[in-house]
Image: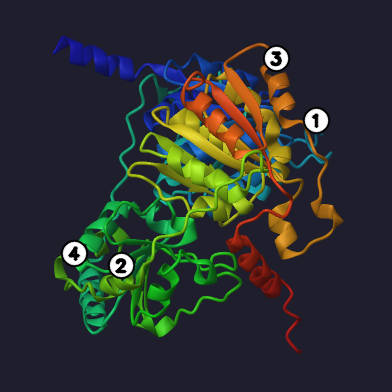
Amino acid sequence: MEDNKQSRLTRHVPSTLGRHVARRLVQIGVRDIFGVPGDFNLTLLDHLIAEPGLNFIGCCNELNAGYAADGYARACGVGACVVTFTVGGLSVINAIAGAYSENLPVICIVGGPNSNDYGTNRILHHTIGLPDFSQEMQCFQTVTCYQAVVNNLEDAHEQIDTAISTALKESKPVYISISCNLSAIPHPTFSIEPVPYFLSPKVSNQLALEAAVEATATFLGKAVKPVLVGGPKLRVAKAQKAFVQLADACGYPVAVMPSGKGMVPEHHPQFIGTYWGAISTNFCGEIVESADAYLFAGPIFNDYSTVGYSLLIKKEKAIVVQPNRVTIGNGPSFGWVFMADFFTALAAKIKKNTTALENYNRIYVPPAMPVRNEDHEPIRVNILFKHIQNMLNGEKAVIAETGDSWFNCQKLHLPENCGYEFQMQYGSIGWSVGATLGYAQAAQDKRVIACIGDGSFQVTAQDVSTMIRNGQKSIIFLLNNGGYTIEVEIHDGPYNVIKNWNYTALVEAMKNGEGKCWTCKVRTEEELLEAIETINGDEKDSLCFVEVILHKDDTSKELLEWGSRVASANSRPPNPQ
């Protein structure tokens, strides 16, 4: 009894704003926060690093800190970054926009101006020279779901707690600006040990749920060869397990949209591959597009995922299940029906139908293996990915950079528990360097394999040094083909050729005699096999950087097809007025 009383007394000892922020981050599962120090956030950083459960990881620039928070959120469920006012905020904003597009809860904290400067006519450094300090917050309004400007202690507790809880509820980034002179000040509203959040679970409208399940079961019951297709919003809906439950119950073939790869278990006996229109996995596209009904779980139909709007999908045959809505054909549509609830209820009612799966098994022919490289013949990209496939297991995770790695990694078959991430909706080149840093820091039980093109790497290369500094053991395959290959296939020009770097020497310079890092250049299949043996052997606990020298025109066939169709969509003439 005495211990409980002491615990209650300790909980209500006033704390500082900075400690409150740190404790809140730890409570929601953030163990590492990425950032760049600047004069407006230094006192706040003192309080963050003083928190025993929180580790500050200094990055080379704010953009990479944001990408790292994005990667961390993918592995951990939530991420956080801290930067300084305006020059830091407007640098990190591109990464925050990407996290918004991918429905990732990232807490973006900015050290703001001294509270006494608000409402004055003073001009501060790190601004555009105007006495209005709202520019940064206005920029963040369209790429975050909540913005808090904390410039007094009276409502700081409410603002911070509302921002963080909103990020978790909406699964979107939030922006918190904290005046630089407030972090060290105690206030009665802050407790040494704040009461943990309780986020009310979202509960479906029971009548709408029952009606949606009844209508869907009837619609699918009339179909001869229906299919299931998983999409990227399975994650934000927290419906991955329920989707598998539905697949088990219905017996339909299970495909995945390209942006949903990694969210549907590929070891499932009904899995047939990636549905990506004209560049689908062999036999998968034919089965999906010939179906007389298809259920899409959390899809995003954009110009990239539809291969330039060329999918042969008919709306009247489709059931589209979004995180909180079910639409059947051209109607009806049922709102406030949550995806996981819907799949669980539908699984209990649906009739098994294996017709489409049987059709798939009849036409399926195993994929051919790429022709082996001759001794000392320059390595080809399909040979590289054949060997990357052999490296995969449940203790690995794949990060695919924007570019031809999208298409090559999409063809990898993921073993059970193997992670997979890429940024298809936003498609910001360079994302993968920071994302690899963040994901590896969060998922320390996995070894990350990052496939990065040379053009993308040049955008964000610096933070390989942060990986070395933090003892990470990721494997980076740098695909050196001399330019922006994905853009070459959309629209070529001299601007797609880049200056070649000595990439391994660059990484060695970052190592600078400190940390565990191994690099090599690979020009042939023999050299690649030797490198993989070293990666899995002597250097299994090191960061491994392998520069693979490829021919500039060596691309996946999928990129060739996709590029021509996206180019066609981009070049449509204006509609007549």
Q: Amino acid at mark 3?
A: Asn
**Residue that numbered label 2 is attached to:** 253
Sequence-wise first label, 3 or 1: 1
**Residue that numbered label 4 is attached to:** 249
The answer to which image quadrant residue 254 occupies is: bottom left
For the N terminus, give its image quadrant.
top left
**Residue that numbered label 3 is attached to:** 512
Residue 107 visible in the current orientation: no
| Cα–Cα span, label 1 and label 2 | 59 Å
Mark 2, secondary structure of its residue: loop
| Cα–Cα span, label 2 and label 3 | 52 Å
Extreme-bottom residue of the structure: 577
Q: Amino acid at mark 4?
A: Ala
| Cα–Cα span, label 4 and label 3 | 56 Å
For the C terminus, give its image quadrant.
bottom right
**Residue that numbered label 1 is attached to:** 125
